[in-house]
Image (spheres, grey):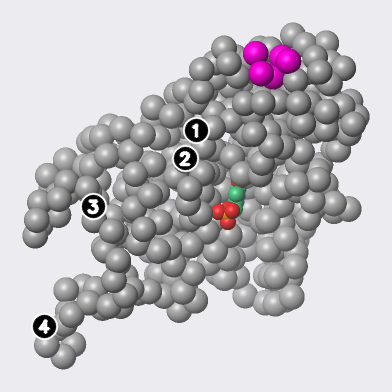
Amino acid sequence: MTDTGETSWGFATRAIHVGQDPETVTGAVTVPVFQTSTFAQEAVGKHSGYEYGRTGNPTRTALQRVLASLEEASFGVAFASGLAAEDAVLRLLDPGDHVVLGNDAYGGTFRLISRVFARTGITWSAHDLSAPAGIGDDWPAATRMVWVETPTNPLLTVVDIAAVAAVAGRKGARLVVDNTFATPYLQRPLAHGADIVVHSTTKYLGGHSDVVGGFVATNDSEVHDHLAFIQNAVGAVPAPWDCYLTMRGVKTLPLRMDRHNANAAAVVALLQGHPAVGQVLYPGLAGHPGHDAARRQMSGFGGMVSFRMGSRDAATRVIESTRLFTLAESLGAVESLIEHPGVMTHASAAGSPLEVPDDLVRLSVGIEDEADLVADLAQALDAGR
Ligand SMILES: *Cc1c(COP(=O)(O)O)cnc(C)c1O
């Protein structure tokens, strides 16, 4: 296997083979966990390309190569968590620069920008980036970065990446897209004009709730050089074992995502027909305001579903009545999870423009049998009435 075939390979082939040639010394078919902090050097200043474990590690290199390939990016840099990846991207900004943030973003992203970066003289504002008209009209002149999540967490709002990219480009701002919910299997933001893609690999890419990690993809060599510098200079690097686990998960990403899509569609059908359920938020629904944009930029609608129960009590009763859907934070793994964003994942956004309704329930629909998931939710909805 050489690099020459890689660009013509399909997604599933790349997920299994890019960066993952048999190891040259023993022929090991699986990329080894290079559990070492340092590398022997042949002579002073003459090394294999690896010197020290923070600076580089072959297991990490393999992960970076496969994930970059899946995003169809020239460069990829891995971090110890999604937030460490976001931190590295935000360090592109200088004091006085402004970040435009979608008004519905992961709570941790909001906390990082409003409580960590704001202290360094970087300003921010939250905007509805899903409204087709007037995007950019109210952005301050100092805007150097636009931070988009699509679909968003937890309201499943869809942002038209190409539309926002056009405005960001005109205004001299870099467009960052958090692609955690869609994964590169369903959506590749760089192809729609994004400059930078960030991931929490903790979610669908790892896919098994057993590792925390982050990743950034870009085609911009200046951004890549910055990220590689920050990776080494700040040192929020993923451990070799975590890189291995993430890569192991990525091999089955296409199979898992197909199943997440199908199971989510079945769950949505149940919710829509149930008298206790209010609004159902899922980009696959024809009535969803972002449905057309989702169809243009996604090849499937994913496994995340949110819905409203009319009151916080009713939401809590459903959340505490499921048996298969486990009450937990996080998302994107094989097992189904249920949570209350207002109290759990998005508590840090309370009182801010990013606050979420308190009757909202968020599901991460897993890859169990569809009938079992539907039956579990049905009994929980009935128990809660
Ligand atoms: C979880 C998550 C993050 C943060 O990633 P960590 O790996 O938990 O640091 C960022 N964005 C989205 C959309 C997420 O779901």
Q: Position of residue 196 (x, y in %)?
A: 49, 54
Sequence-earlier tag: 1 or 2:
2
Residue 378 part of the magenta segment: yes
Residue 5 vs residue 238, the one in the foreground = 238
Sequence-earlier tag: 3 or 1:
3
From the viewer's perspective, is the residue at label 1 or at label 4 nearer? 1
Sequence-earlier tag: 3 or 4:
3
- Gap in Å between the C-alphas at discs 3 and 1? 23 Å
Three-letter residue code for mark 4: Glu
Single out the residue that lies furthest toward the front. 323
Quadrant of the snapshot with the N terminus: top left
Residue at mark 1: C-beta within 8 A of ligand 1: no
| Label ID, residue 207 | 2
Secondary element under disc 4, as helix, strand or loop, is loop
Q: Is residue 327 left or right of residue 89?
A: right
Residue at mark 4: C-beta within 8 A of ligand 1: no
- Gap in Å between the C-alphas at discs 2 and 4? 39 Å
Q: Main secondary structure of the magenta part?
A: helix
Total numbered circles: 4
Q: Residue at x 63, y 53 (%)?
A: 147
Q: Residue at x 55, y 69 (%)?
A: 92
Residue under label 3, please give it: 31
In this rendering, the answer to whether 364 lies above or below 234 is above
Residue under label 4, please give it: 42
Q: Is residue 104 left or right of residue 10?
A: right
How many residues crowd mark 3 within 10 Å: few (<14), some (14–19), many (20+)? many
Residue under label 1, please give it: 334
Secondary element under disc 1, as helix, strand or loop, is loop
Residue 195 visible (yes or no): no
Secondary element under disc 2, as helix, strand or loop, is loop
In this picture, which residue range is highlighted in magenta? 375-379
